[in-house]
Image (tube, helix red, strand yellow):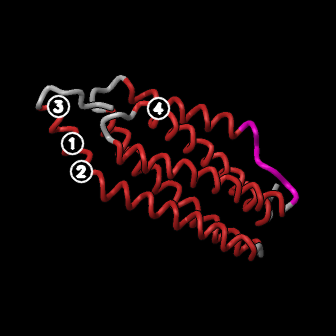
Amino acid sequence: MQENIREIYVSGLVNARALETQAIQLLSRQVERLENYPEVEAQLRRHIQESEVQRDRLDELLSSLGTSHSAFKDMVTGFMGNMAAAGHVVAPDEVLKNQIANYAFEHFEIASYRSLITLAELAGHAAAHAPLDLSLREEERMAQWCHDNLDTVTRRYASLRTRGETAGV
């Protein structure tokens, strides 16, 4: 069965919505454990709020198309986010692993939003461009923050570790 462009676009919106659920879970688990990196904690809290708004934007786009998100996909990706965060807990360099993973995850979200903007255009859903572009810009800002702060977090981690202090989270 051949899918039409609208079906492909709607599927992309559903997947992006699930991806935001995963991001919220992933970052929420990280924030719970941060104590030695207040600047990271503050930024993650801001981005959790942005991700919640992004998820709402996707819900509005889906609703405007007469459909909604997939509870199953949200459950699966939320679980994956929790497991990804838990996977780093046992590592002494958890904060570095999280920072690197967040940097990569933000770029995955950037690519997803770029693709969705193209699909919206192909599907003739012009109203989607502004909200999708806003979410794209927010993800780009978070990716840039991850980039700009990786050196600082790495140096702080190394400094704490070499002084024998708690260097993880």
Q: Which residue is mark 2?
A: 152
Query: Which element is circle 2 on?
Result: helix
- Amino acid tagged 3: Arg
Disc sitting over residue 125 in the figure: none
Dot 3 or dot 4, earlier in sequence: 4
The question of residue 64 being in magenta is answered with no
Residue at 11 percent of width and 30 percent of height: 163
Residue at 33 percent of width and 32 percent of height: 169
Dot 2 or dot 3, earlier in sequence: 2
Q: Which residue is mark 1?
A: 156
Residue at 41 percent of width and 30 percent of height: 33
Query: Which element is circle 4 on?
Result: helix
Residue 73 lies, in percent from the top left, at 70, 40
Query: Which element is circle 1 on?
Result: helix
Q: Are marks 2 and 1 in contact (CB under 8 Å)?
A: yes
Q: Which residues are magenta?
A: 66-72
Q: Which residue is mark 3?
A: 161
Residue 135 lies, in percent from the top left, at 59, 63
Q: Marks 2/3: CA distance?
A: 14 Å
Dot 4 or dot 1, earlier in sequence: 4
Image position of 154 (left or right of 142): left
Dot 4 or dot 2, earlier in sequence: 4
- Amino acid tagged 1: Arg
Disc sitting over residue 32 in the figure: 4
Q: Marks 2/1: CA distance?
A: 6 Å
- Amino acid tagged 4: Glu
Residue 143 lies, in percent from the top left, at 42, 58
Q: Marks 3/1: CA distance?
A: 8 Å
